[in-house]
Image: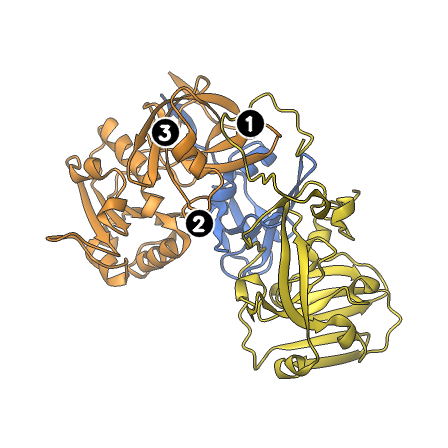
C-alpha cells in the first residue's frame, strides 16, 4: 500500500508499546504499534511527548531504528540528567501507551535511489538512523556497497552489536573504540580523525554519498574531514545530536 | 494544574520534574525548582580575552569604560539570590560576586530612564534604569565562589535577579542609557518588556 | 550548550509551515550562504529557538512558542525555498 506523506500536518497520536529490548546497559529499543502510521523513510525521526498528571509535558525527538515496512521502533539512550530518557528506558512497559508524531524529516533520508557507494559514519547513538538505512538496503535488495564507520567508547557501548557483527554482503563495518578496547581487538582504538577517515572512506572519485550522525563535535570533525578528502558538501549529509545524545 | 492545558492522555508513571518539598512562597507562578544550572543560549559562547575586555556605560556621546582590571578593582559585593528563568526553572540561593551597577552608574550623569544592556555576540535586553539601581543589579564575575564560566556568561554577566533571568544578560559588555524603552533581543521576538516573575510577565501582553 | 542543526527543528517547522522544510534552501541575508535548512546552526532550549547561518552566524530564524501559538521571524533570511518532501512512501 503506497500513501503519500507530502504536505501532511503532523498530528499527535497514541501508539502502544509492543516490545522493549535492552541493546546495551544504557540503551533500549522500543517497538511500537502505531495504528495511523503512513510509513516512513530510513533516516527519519519521530517526536515523543510525555504528559504528567498535572499537565506538565516534555517532548523529545528520536530517530526511527527500523526500516520502512518493519514495525516502528526507536532506540533510546538513557541520559543521567535526562527527563524523558530515564522514563523511556526504565519505566515504560509493554502495553503502555506512548504519544508520538511523525515521521519527520526529509533531508537525512536514504531511499535507495542513489546507486553510488554509501558511507555511513556514526558516533555513539548516531548509529540509530544509520541502522534503519542498513536494514532498508537489505530489505529492498539494494546492491549499493556500504562502509559503516562506527565510533563507540567501549565494546559494551556498541548498539546492535550482534547485528553489526554479521553484516550482509556488500556491507563493511569498521569500528573504533575510543576509551577502552578488549584484548585482541583488531579495530581502531582512537577518535575518528582525518587520517582514519582517509583509510576508511570511499575515495571521492567514486562519487559516494555520506551520512554522518552523532554528537555535534563528532559530526563537525567528520564532515570537514570528508570535504577535505574531496567529498562535495552536498554529498555529505549530517545530523547532529546533543553532546549528551538526545535532542 | 501546572498549566492550563486540558489533557486527555496521561503517560503512566511519568512525573516530570516536580518537587513537592518546595516552599511555595519562594516559587513564582508556573515555575519548578531545579538543583541544576541549565545552560540556555541563542548563539555560540563568545570568548573575549580579558586583555581586550571592557565594560562601558554609554550616555549619548558620553562613555565611561572600565578594563577588566579596573572593574575587578571596584568595590564588590557578595550576593545570594533566587533566580527564575522564563523556561520555568527556578534556582534558590545562588551565590555571586560582582560590582553593583549603582557603583558604575555613579560615574555617569544621565536623566535617561531606560537602559539597553549589550553583549558579546550581539545579545541585548532592555530594562528601566530604576531596575538596575538601588541595589537591584550587579555586573557579576564569580558564581559559587569560582570565576564565572563562559557557558554561564563569563567573564561577566549582568545579574538582575528580581526579573526573569533572560534580563541577566550573559557576556555583558555595557549599558546604554536611553530615553526610549526599545526592546532587546527576546523582547523583539515577543517576550515581555519588563519580565516580573511574580506577575508571570513572560510574553508581551501578559 | 552545544548547537544542533535544522534536523532538530524539523517537526516544529513542519507544524508551522504545513510541509517538510529541512530540505528547503535558505539564503543568508548577511553573507549569502546557501544551504538546506537542515544544515543551519540551531540553538534550542533558549526562551526561543534560534537558527543561525553556518558561515557567518547571522540570526536567520527565530521561533517563539507563546500561549499555544508559534511566532516565526524570518527577517535574517534573504530567501527560503520551498521544501521538497519525500514523495511516496511504501509500506
* Upstream in sequence: badge 3 or badge 2: 3
Please tell me how crowded label 1 is: few (under 14), some (14-19), or many (20+) other residues with Cα within 10 Å. some
Judged left or right of residue A233, residue A195 is left
Please tell me how crowded label 3 is: few (under 14), some (14-19), or many (20+) other residues with Cα within 10 Å. many
Instruction: Identify the image quadrant of residue A138.
Output: top left
**Horizontal and vertical percent position of residue C51:** 56, 51
Judged left or right of residue B71, residue A202 is left
Gap between marks 3 and 2, in whole Å?
Answer: 21 Å
Please tell me how crowded label 2 is: few (under 14), some (14-19), or many (20+) other residues with Cα within 10 Å. some
Residue at 69%, 61% (x, y): give it: B124
Judged left or right of residue A52, residue B58 is right
Chain under disc 1: A
Q: Which chain is orange?
A: A
Give the labeled residue for mark 1: A9
Visual hue assigned to chain B: yellow
**Element class at badge 3:** strand
Residue at 22%, 47% (x, y): give it: A155
Looking at the image, is A243 positioned above or below residue A18? below
Chain under disc 2: A
Amino acid at each position: 500500500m503506497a500513501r503519500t506523506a507530502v504536505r501532511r500536518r503532523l498530528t499527535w497520536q497514541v501508539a502502544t508499546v509492543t516490545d522493549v529490548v535492552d541493546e546495551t546497559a544504557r540503551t533500549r529499543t522500543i517497538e511500537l504499534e502505531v495504528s495511523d502510521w503512513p510509513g516512513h523513510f530510513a533516516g527519519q525521526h519521530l517526536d515523543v511527548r510525555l504528559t504528567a498528571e498535572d499537565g506538565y509535558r516534555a517532548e523529545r525527538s528520536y530517530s526511527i531504528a527500523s526500516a520502512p515496512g518493519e514495525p516502528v521502533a526507536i532506540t533510546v539512550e538513557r541520559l543521567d540528567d535526562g527527563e524523558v530518557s530515564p522514563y523511556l528506558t526504565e519505566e515504560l512497559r509493554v502495553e503502555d501507551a506512548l504519544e508520538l508524531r511523525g515521521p519527520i524529516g526529509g533531508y537525512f533520508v536514504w531511499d535507495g535511489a542513489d546507486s553510488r557507494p554509501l558511507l555511513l559514519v556514526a558516533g555513539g547513538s548516531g548509529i540509530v538512523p544509520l541502522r534503519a538505512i542498513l536494514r532498508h538496503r537489505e530489505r529492498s535488495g539494494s546492491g549499493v556497497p556500504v562502509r559503516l564507520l562506527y565510533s563507540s567508547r567501549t565494546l559494551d557501548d556498541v548498539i546492535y552489536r550482534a547485528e553489526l557483527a554479521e553484516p550482509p554482503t556488500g556491507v563493511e563495518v569498521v569500528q573504533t573504540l575510543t576509551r577502552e578496547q578488549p584484548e585482541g581487538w583488531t579495530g581502531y582504538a582512537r577518535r575518528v580523525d582525518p587520517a582514519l577517515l582517509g583509510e576508511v572512506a570511499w575515495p571521492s572519485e567514486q562519487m559516494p554519498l555520506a551520512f554522518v550522525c552523532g554528537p555535534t563535535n563528532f559530526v563537525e570533525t567528520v564532515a570537514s574531514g570528508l570535504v577535505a578528502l574531496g567529498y562535495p558538501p552536498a554529498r555529505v549529509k549530517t545530523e547532529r545530536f546533543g553532546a549528551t545524545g538526545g535532542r | 494544574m501546572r498549566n492550563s492545558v486540558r489533557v486527555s492522555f496521561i503517560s503512566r508513571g511519568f512525573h516530570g520534574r516536580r518537587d513537592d518539598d518546595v516552599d511555595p512562597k519562594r516559587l513564582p507562578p508556573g515555575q519548578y525548582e531545579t538543583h541544576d544550572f541549565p545552560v540556555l543560549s541563542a548563539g555560540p559562547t563568545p570568548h573575549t580575552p580579558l586583555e581586550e575586555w571592557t565594560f562601558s556605560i554609554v550616555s549619548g556621546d558620553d562613555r565611561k569604560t572600565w578594563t577588566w582590571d579596573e572593574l575587578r578593582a571596584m568595590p564588590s559585593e557578595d550576593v545570594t539570590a533566587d533566580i527564575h528563568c522564563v523556561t520555568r526553572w527556578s534556582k534558590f540561593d545562588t551565590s555571586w560576586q560582582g560590582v553593583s551597577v549603582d557603583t558604575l552608574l555613579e560615574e555617569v550623569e544621565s536623566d535617561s530612564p531606560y537602559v539597553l544592556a549589550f553583549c558579546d555576540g550581539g545579545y541585548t535586553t532592555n530594562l528601566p534604569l530604576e531596575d538596575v539601581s538601588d541595589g537591584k543589579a550587579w555586573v557579576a564575575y564569580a558564581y559559587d565562589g569560582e570565576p564565572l564560566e563562559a557557558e554561564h556568561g563569563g567573564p561577566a554577566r549582568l545579574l538582575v535577579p528580581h526579573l526573569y533571568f533572560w534580563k541577566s544578560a550573559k557576556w555583558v559588555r555595557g549599558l546604554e542609557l536611553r530615553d526610549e524603552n526599545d526592546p532587546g533581543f527576546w523582547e523583539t521576538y515577543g517576550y515581555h518588556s519588563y519580565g516580573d516573575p511574580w506577575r508571570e510577565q513572560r510574553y508581551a501582553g501578559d | 550548550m552545544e548547537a544542533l542543526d535544522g534536523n532538530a527543528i524539523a517537526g516544529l517547522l513542519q507544524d508551522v509551515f504545513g510541509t517538510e522544510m529541512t530540505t528547503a534552501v535558505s539564503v543568508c541575508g548577511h553573507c549569502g550562504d546557501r544551504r538546506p535548512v537542515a544544515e543551519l546552526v540551531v540553538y534550542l532550549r533558549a526562551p526561543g529557538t534560534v537558527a543561525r547561518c553556518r558561515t557567518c552566524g547571522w540570526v536567520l530564524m527565530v521561533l517563539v512558542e507563546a500561549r499555544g501559538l508559534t511566532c516565526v521571524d524570518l527577517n535574517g533570511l534573504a530567501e527560503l525555498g520551498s521544501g521538497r518532501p519525500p514523495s511516496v512512501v511504501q509500506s
